[in-house]
Structures are given as C-alpha cells and as structure tokens.
Image (spheres, helix red, strand yellow):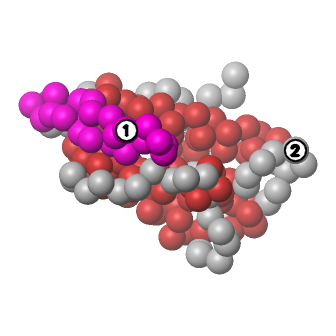
Amino acid sequence: MNELQRNLIGNGFGAPPSHVLEAVDDAMAHRRYPGAPHSIYEEVWHLAFWQQLTLDWIAGKPTKYPEHASEGFPASTDEPWDTVRERFLQRAKKLAEIAGDEAQLGASVVSQSRTPEPARTRSLREQIEGEATHNAYHLGRVVLLRQVFGAWPPPSGGDTW
C-alpha cells in the first residue's frame, strides 16, 4: 500500500476511516451538537458526495461543480445511516484502488470549478491527494464530534492525543 492509499483507507493522517466511523449508530450519526454546523451523518454524506464527483472527473464525466455549498450536503437525512457510511467507505476504497496504479497517477484529470472559473486540469495524483486531504479534514470533524459525545476512541482504536 502506497502512502496515498494509506491516507485514503489506512492509518495515514489519523485513524483509518473505517475506525473513525466504527460503532457510530444511527442516533449518534444524527445527533446535533450546539454550535457545530453538521452532524456526523451530514459530514459523511458530504464526503461521499465529493468522492463521487472525483470519481466522475477521473472517468472523464464533466460532472458540474455545485453552485452552492448547501448542494454538497444532504437535503434530508432519510437515507439510512448504514447506507451513507458504506457508500463513503466503498468510494474511498475505489479511490485507493485507483491510487495504487502508480503508472496512471500522472494522467490528466479535468475537474470542474465554481462558476465562472474554467475547468482545471491536474494530474490524477493531485486529484486524489485533494480528495484525501478533504476526507482528513471532515473525518477530523467527525472525531471531534465523537469526542464531545464521549464516544472516542472507537473499539478498534484511534489516537487520543
């Protein structure tokens, strides 16, 4: 496993994403904390949303960049939590599989930008690195929510410092 793969699904930036989300039940996923803009459910839904954009762009599909930040978060939380969590984990795994093909990491990816900015062309490595960084940011928010809820570390472990 290379470092980019580790940052997507392993113990790279912090605890593996599967550990961060381990033992988060439906009630905790939807629980709100005063002052926090999003629930765990919303943070993970957001991650899966952006992973799909990245996968679309990697596949050459010119999927539109959201016009407003609100489009990157769920309009409702009716979808089962387990489905949202698994979608995020499966997309992270797919990105890690792509990142494991060292020969293809230099390929160009066209990613859409906010209107009126033009689309950007960057390497596949840069696109996936951006996604890994985005995941780390939002998973850190999930860890913080778990900490304030008294639900950290998860059973499989995670940094407590």
Mark 2 neighbour density, 10 Å: few (under 14) some (14–19) many (20 or more) = few
Name the one closer to the observer, 56 or 110: 110
Q: Is residue 116 magenta?
A: yes
Q: Is residue 64 left or right of residue 144?
A: left
What residue is disc 2 on?
35
Residue underneath mark 1: 118
Q: Residues within 10 Å of mark 1 (few under 14, many from 20)?
A: few
Of the 4 image quadrants, the one containing the C terminus is top right
Q: Is residue 36 left or right of residue 129?
A: right
First to last magenta residue range: 102-124
Q: Residue 154, how many percent across, how many down?
A: 63, 45
**The N terminus is located in which quarter?**
top left
Picture residue at 37% right of the left edge, 30% below the top: 129
Q: Nearer the viewer, residue 123 or 140?
A: 123
- To which quarter of the image does residue 99 belong? top left
Residue 59 picture location, percent across and down: 21, 53
Kindly report which numbered mark, 1 or 2, lies closer to the viewer in this rendering: 1
Decide if residue 66 is in sight here. Answer: yes
Q: Residue at x 59, y 75 (%)?
A: 79
List the single residue furthest toward the top: 161
Q: CA distance from mark 1 to mark 2?
A: 35 Å
Which residue is at the far left? Answer: 103
Asked if the stretch drawn in magenta spans residue 105, the answer is yes
Q: Residue at x 73, y 55 (%)?
A: 39
Task: Note whether 92 is above or below 108 in the view shown.
Answer: below
Amino acid residing under circle 1: Pro
At 69% from the left and 60% from the top, the residue drawn is 29
Q: Are marks 1 and 2 in contact (CB under 8 Å)?
A: no
- Measured as percent of width and height from the top left, residue 147 is found at 77, 39
Asked if residue 11 can be seen in this view, the reply is no
The amino acid marked with disc number 2 is Gly
